[in-house]
């Protein structure tokens, strides 16, 4: 969206440059991409995430062992013939669980984060833009959701309804939107009083147009950072709920692997350690990308 | 400042409204759930007699109109009655009251530890923002945020209870020790080490990062420059002038984070079978013990509301720059 707004500018500046050797003005997105690419940790996170996506989306086509099948002697340690990551207490292949269980973990994390961003953005933008009683009411609701201990509330939602992938994603989304809402509200409050919004209003732009096409694109950078944080948080949340035994027992996921092997961890460290490492690496990758985006889009941090 | 009492009253009313909202939410959750709670109880208890079903139904007032049921529900909660646990066959309030001290012991110890050490780490890091220690803090914070807390706990268990059996893997004290004896407290202390360490670690990462940022912010301000210009020693500037103000946001956020700390405690308690509210909540969920789980949700929300209220009021008291009642 911001491309639409600045591309005429760029064309103009390019024309000027030819005439009078002005220092070139880089497009903000390109500049952010360049800053991001210079950040080794962020690029490392991106590579890690791509690796994890390949593992969970492509490798399942090649490694077709069913993660629920009993393939080998129970509690075989890693390095045993045919089962490089070992087996769990039922003799299920842990490598198969890692390869096939990642999809559920990422899908729930992603869906929950999208839900959290949609709710948070709607509440925050309306509160910040309209102010007054709208702000008052919406912020009271936000405050209410902040008071509920998130994990307990999500546990209650999952327990009241049937624990399915959709319920878990819904529960996580419903409890984790408040941070996005607060950020969106403060961004909208700040931007709404800037000159370019005033001029948009003075030429008769509708509220809807101002919210979507004028303020939102400019509020996007910090919101994107918050959204990546939400993805990491949601993946951790899904893992926690599965660990507590509140995930769909018919869907293999990394958290489910840890939860179902909980009673065997003293005898078979690999059953819980290996899935945990993958959760950790995924969240780490997302956090590194989030940090990188933050550094790349926040002009105050540029000089560091 | 004349209207300070009005604002305090306002804050308290706001807190009361929040608590009422939690009550209504609890009530709605009971009603939204597919099938009513009596079916769930009946199903869980197996062969339940029709008389008992009728009794439970009357106990919940399920034959009355919805608004009347809500009124009854609010009245009961006001009397301190959070219902009756069907699994434990005990009033929910008693269950919560028995589990609460253990959770508070765990949470408060971990939180204080994280707060004190985190602040110290942050101050050290802020004195050399590009030094090795500062980078180490950043990495630690990243790892602390990315590792699932229950997994960290399990790693501790595997390392320090299984490979090197230094600490007990579960529970709070050996069953043969009597509460009150010195041995008992020492044993509790021994059992506490791993769960406290696990819970403290995430918040340690968080507070180190927060206090580093807060300290850097304050160290760049004018009055610190003035203090330096007056020729005060670096130690006085950092610890007497800067730290005092840097602490304000740290303490505030610590108070406001209580809801999240409780969530972490649920997971840590589950890992170490620590007999607190989290373990009780998990047990209640797995047994589909509705009154208990909703009672815990209500109780912990009230605790959070009170914590937030206290933080809010203290914040206003310690920082005269904050005008009470003003919007962010």
Image (tube, coloured by chain):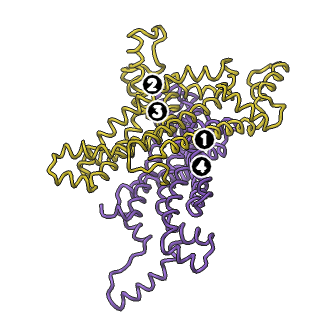
> Which residue is depicted at the point 67% across and 25% down?
B81
Residues marked 1 and 4, same chain: no
Per the model, the C-alpha gap separating discs 3 and 1 is 45 Å
Per the model, the C-alpha gap separating discs 3 and 4 is 46 Å
The residue wearing badge 1 is B18
Depth check, front residue: B52 or A272: B52
- Mark 2 and 3 residues: CB-CB less than 8 Å, in contact? no
> Which residue is depicted at the point 14% across and 50% down?
B231
> Which residue is depicted at the point 27% across and 52% down?
B219
The mark closer to the camera, 3 or 4, is: 4
Residues marked 1 and 2, same chain: yes
Badge 2 element: helix
Q: Residues within 10 Å of mark 3 (few under 14, many from 20)?
A: many
Which mark identifies residue A270? 3
Q: Residues within 10 Å of mark 2 (few under 14, many from 20)?
A: few
**Which of the two discs, 1 and 2, labels the residue nearer the N terminus?**
1
Per the model, the C-alpha gap separating discs 2 and 3 is 32 Å
Per the model, the C-alpha gap separating discs 1 and 2 is 26 Å
């Amino acid at each position: 969206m911001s491309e639409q707004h600045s591309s005429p500018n760029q064309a103009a500046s390019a024309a000027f440059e030819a005439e009078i050797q002005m220092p070139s003005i880089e497009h903000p997105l390109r500049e952010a991409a360049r800053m991001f690419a210079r950040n080794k940790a962020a690029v490392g996170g991106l590579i890690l995430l791509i690796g994890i996506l390949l593992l969970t989306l492509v490798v399942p086509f090649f490694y077709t062992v069913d993660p629920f099948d009993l393939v080998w002697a129970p509690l075989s340690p890693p390095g045993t013939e045919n089962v490089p990551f070992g087996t769990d207490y039922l003799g299920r292949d842990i490598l198969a669980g890692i390869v096939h269980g990642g999809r559920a973990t990422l899908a729930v994390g992603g869906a929950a984060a999208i839900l959290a961003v949609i709710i948070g953005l709607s509440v925050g933008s309306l509160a910040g833009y309209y102010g007054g009683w709208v702000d008052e009411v919406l912020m009271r609701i936000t405050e209410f959701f902040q008071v509920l201990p998130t994990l307990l509330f999500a546990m209650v939602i999952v327990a009241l309804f049937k624990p399915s992938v959709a319920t878990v994603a819904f529960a996580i989304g419903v409890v984790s939107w408040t941070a996005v809402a607060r950020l969106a509200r403060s961004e909208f409050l700040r931007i709404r009083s800037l000159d370019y919004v005033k001029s948009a209003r003075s030429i008769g732009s509708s509220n809807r147009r101002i919210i979507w096409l004028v303020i939102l694109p400019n509020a996007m950078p910090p919101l994107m950072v918050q959204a990546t944080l939400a993805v990491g948080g949601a993946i951790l949340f899904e893992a926690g709920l599965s660990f507590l035994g509140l995930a769909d027992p018919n869907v293999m996921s990394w958290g489910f692997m840890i939860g179902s092997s909980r009673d065997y961890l003293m005898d078979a460290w690999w059953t819980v350690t290996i899935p945990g490492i993958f959760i950790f690496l995924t969240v780490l990758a997302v956090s590194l990308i989030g940090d990188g985006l933050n550094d790349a889009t926040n002009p105050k941090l540029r000089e560091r | 400042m004349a209207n300070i009492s009005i604002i305090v009253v306002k804050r308290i009313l706001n807190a009361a409204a929040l608590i009422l909202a939690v009550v209504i939410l609890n009530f709605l959750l009971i009603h939204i759930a597919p099938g009513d709670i009596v079916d769930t109880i009946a199903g869980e208890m197996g062969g339940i007699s029709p008389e008992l079903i009728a009794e439970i139904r009357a106990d919940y007032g399920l034959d009355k109109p919805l608004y009347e049921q809500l009124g009854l529900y609010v009245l009961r909660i006001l009397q301190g009655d959070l219902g009756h646990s069907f699994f434990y066959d005990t009033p929910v309030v008693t269950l919560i009251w028995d589990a609460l001290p253990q959770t508070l012991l765990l949470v408060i110890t971990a939180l204080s530890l994280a707060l004190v050490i985190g602040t110290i780490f942050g101050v050290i890091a802020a004195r050399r923002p590009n030094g090795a220690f500062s980078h180490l803090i950043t990495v630690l914070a990243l790892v602390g945020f990315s590792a699932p807390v229950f997994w960290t706990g399990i790693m501790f268990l595997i390392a320090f209870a299984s490979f090197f059996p230094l600490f007990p893997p579960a529970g709070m004290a050996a069953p043969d020790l009597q509460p009150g004896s010195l041995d008992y407290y020492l044993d509790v202390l021994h059992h506490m080490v791993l769960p406290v360490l696990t819970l403290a670690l995430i918040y340690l990462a968080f507070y180190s990062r927060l206090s580093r940022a807060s300290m850097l912010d304050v160290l760049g301000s004018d009055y610190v420059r003035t203090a330096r210009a007056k020729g005060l020693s670096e130690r006085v500037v950092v610890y007497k002038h800067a730290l005092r103000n840097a602490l304000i946001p740290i303490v505030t956020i610590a108070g406001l984070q209580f809801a999240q700390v409780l969530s972490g405690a649920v997971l840590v308690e589950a890992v170490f079978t620590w007999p607190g509210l989290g373990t009780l909540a998990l047990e209640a969920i797995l047994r589909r013990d509705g009154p208990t789980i909703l009672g815990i949700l209500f109780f912990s929300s009230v605790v959070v509301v009170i914590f937030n209220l206290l933080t809010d009021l203290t914040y206003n008291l310690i920082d005269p720059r904050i005008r009470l009642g003003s919007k962010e």
